[in-house]
């Protein structure tokens, strides 16, 4: 489904991503691991077209995403939960969720009810501004907003950063169940309290070449020192 080939990215004279190769087969869960500053978020932003890669390919369903504008990802049913959530703080919960409806095919007028089953707190706060929610509630809103797209590929960057353990558990339960029921492929690297089942021999890289792709049956693995 997603294949990255020989990807290189620079910030000025700093070579951030070095010849990255990664494959995310359909129906799989891939976790990225690495120390702070090693390029995990940069890689995800390259996939989403928010950062320009210098060379290489980002193939999704056989087509190179590098040649497409960033907004085309949503039309191709790629959901993204960025680090720091980046919800629209002045919009209500309902308005944040409705943003994804515009690219649904066939188009929907109403937010899918099952999202409220996943995140019941959002239904209780539909008319509250996003900026008034707690950190954990904002994270649930960010994930639900991505799921409104009915994504074929869901990318989550630090999905448990800065939120309390019970919310981490709730999000972990939702993502894990979703992985098994709809065949969606998911990308991200760690999640504090969640268990991980890794393939034998799967270990993170060290040094400048950033990342080792880890496949598992859950979304995340234990924290990396």
Image (cartoon, grey):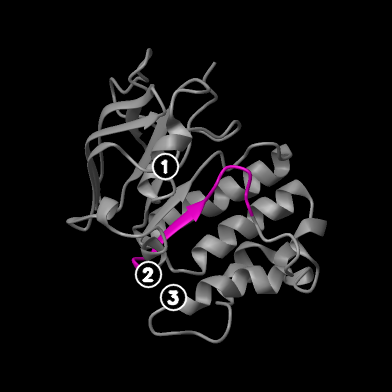
Q: Residues within 10 Å of mark 3 (few under 14, many from 20)?
A: some
**SS type, badge 1:** helix
Quadrant where the C terminus sits is top right
x, y percent for residue 74: 41, 65
Q: Report the predominant secondary structure element of the magenta stretch.
A: loop
- Of the two numbered discs 1 and 3 on the same chain, state the one appearing first in sequence: 1
Q: Which residues are magenta?
A: 76-86
Residue 11, quarter of picture? top left
- Give the side of residue 78 with respect to residue 157, left or right: left
**SS type, badge 3:** helix
* CA separation in Å, label 1 and label 2: 18 Å
Which residue is rendered at x = 55% and y = 54% of the image? 174
Residue 140, quarter of picture? bottom right
Which residue is rendered at x = 51% and y = 42% of the image? 157
Residue 52, quarter of picture? top left
* Residue 29 seen: yes
Which residue is rendered at x = 36% and y = 64% of the image? 72
- Give the side of residue 81 with respect to residue 94, left or right: left
Please give the label number shown on residue 103.
3
x, y percent for residue 93: 71, 68
Q: Are marks 3 and 2 in contact (CB under 8 Å)?
A: yes
């Amino acid at each position: 489904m997603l294949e990255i080939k020989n990807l290189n990215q620079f910030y000025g004279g700093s070579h951030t991503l070095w010849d990255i190769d990664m494959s995310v087969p359909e129906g799989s869960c891939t976790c990225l691991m690495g120390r702070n500053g090693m390029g995990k978020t940069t890689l995800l932003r390259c996939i989403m077209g928010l950062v320009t890669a210098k060379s290489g390919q980002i193939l999704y369903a056989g087509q190179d995403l590098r040649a497409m504008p960033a907004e085309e990802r949503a039309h191709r049913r790629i959901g993204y939960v960025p680090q720091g959530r980046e919800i629209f703080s002045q919009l209500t919960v309902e308005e944040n969720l409705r943003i994804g409806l515009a690219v649904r095919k066939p188009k929907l007028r109403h937010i899918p009810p099952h999202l409220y089953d996943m995140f019941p707190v959002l239904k209780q706060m539909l008319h509250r501004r996003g900026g008034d929610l707690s950190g954990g509630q904002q994270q649930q809103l960010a994930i639900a907003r991505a799921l409104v797209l009915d994504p074929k590929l869901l990318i989550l960057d630090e999905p448990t950063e800065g939120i309390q353990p019970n919310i981490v558990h709730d999000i972990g339960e939702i993502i894990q169940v979703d992985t098994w029921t709809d065949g969606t492929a998911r990308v991200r690297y760690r999640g504090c309290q969640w268990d991980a089942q890794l393939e034998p021999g799967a270990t993170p890289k060290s040094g400048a070449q950033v990342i080792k792709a880890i496949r598992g049956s859950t979304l995340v693995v234990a924290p990396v020192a």
